[in-house]
Image: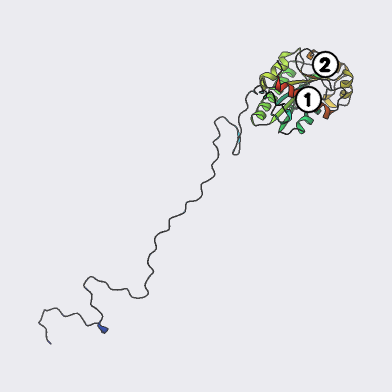
Amino acid sequence: MQHAVGSPLPPPHQPGGAPQHQPGYLGAPSGPVPPAPQPPVPAVPPPPAPQHAPVPQGTDATGHVPLPPGGPVPMPSAPPAPIVPDPAATTLAVLLIGPAGAGKTSVAKFWADHRRVPTAHVSLDDVREWVRSGFADPQSGWNDHSEAQYRLARRTCGFAARNFLANGISCILDDAIFPDRPAVGLGGWKRHVGPGLLPVVLLPGLEVVLERNAERSGNRRLTDEEVARIHGRMAGWYGSGLPIIDNSQLDVPTTARVLDDVLARAIASPPKW
């Protein structure tokens, strides 16, 4: 069969009678058929970083642990009348007063060691002796230099006590202060720690104080004359309104139990000082 010149040729015959496709159809791809595209899997965000409570401006911190700033210790509130206060389970600030050889440090350490709540012991003598070169030893004479170091040590102890209390740790301080020296005594402690400080006087007899002083060494040991003079001035605490414990015949554990009894009464009825 003949076709006219210029007429289009019919599409070639496909073997097997395969259907013819319209122009524009590209046909099935040759070779293996690729898998159908899968929808994208959304990315899983990483777990959020642990958040820490922001530390208020002006607050010291160690690592990420916020430390509340220390403030004046308030007067402890008396519990309801039917409840007997338990000083062993109460956060307190205690000042143990007494002459050299009264047993203040031994009693304070024992009392702090055997409480049911965290408790720190701060001795003013220990803090004074942080000064190594240039230490002003009061035994060499009480002068402006030794008084300045004493005031600095007392203020440092006060800051420590306030910070301990602000972080839930009780504190017992010990110092040999005189009732006739308010400028270098009880008034300064109240100013640096706060009105909630509970003072207790430890005052054994002179013979006991002399015997205990004789067991000391270094600059902690005083002459017998100095011990007698200090003990005589401490007698001025009688009539001051502060609780006084005569531990002449008491060992350290018994004195600590008596101290708890005295503090229980002081919590219920704070002393006027």
In the rendered view, would you say 73 is above or below 39?
Answer: above
> Residue at the location (68% across, 19% down)?
190
- Which comes sooner in the sequence, label 2 or label 1? 2
Displayed quadrant of residue 68: top right
Asked whether, in this view, residue 209 is left or right of residue 194, the answer is: right
Asked whether, in this view, residue 217 is left or right of residue 97, the answer is: right
Displayed quadrant of residue 119: top right
Q: Is mark 2 on a helix, strand or loop?
A: helix
Q: What element carries label 1?
A: helix
Label placed on residue 230: 2
- Of residues 235 and 263, which is closer to you in this image? 263
Task: Give amino acid for label 2.
Answer: Ile
Spatial CA distance of label 2 from label 1 is: 22 Å
- Of residues 203 and 90, which is closer to you in this image? 90
In the rendered view, would you say 237 is above or below 54?
Answer: above
**Front of the two marks 2 and 1:** 1
Question: Residue most toward the bottom?
Answer: 1
Q: Position of residue 9 (x, y in %)?
A: 16, 80
- Of residues 231 and 196, which is closer to you in this image? 196
> Residue at the location (73% across, 16% down)?
184
Count residues near mark 1 (Cα–Cα under 10 Å), then give few for <14, some for 14-19, many for 20+: many
Q: Position of residue 98 (x, y in %)?
A: 80, 20
Tell me the quarter of the image containing the N terminus.
Answer: bottom left
Question: Residue most toward the front?
Answer: 82
- Of residues 133 and 40, which is closer to you in this image? 40
Task: Please indicate, yes or no, whether residue 135 appears anywhere in the rendered image.
Answer: no
Tell me the quarter of the image containing the C terminus.
Answer: top right
In the rendered view, would you say 261 is above or below 3?
Answer: above
Residue at numbered disc 1 = 259
Task: Give amino acid for label 1.
Answer: Leu
Task: Please indicate, yes or no, whether residue 189 appears anywhere in the rendered image.
Answer: yes
Displayed quadrant of residue 239: top right
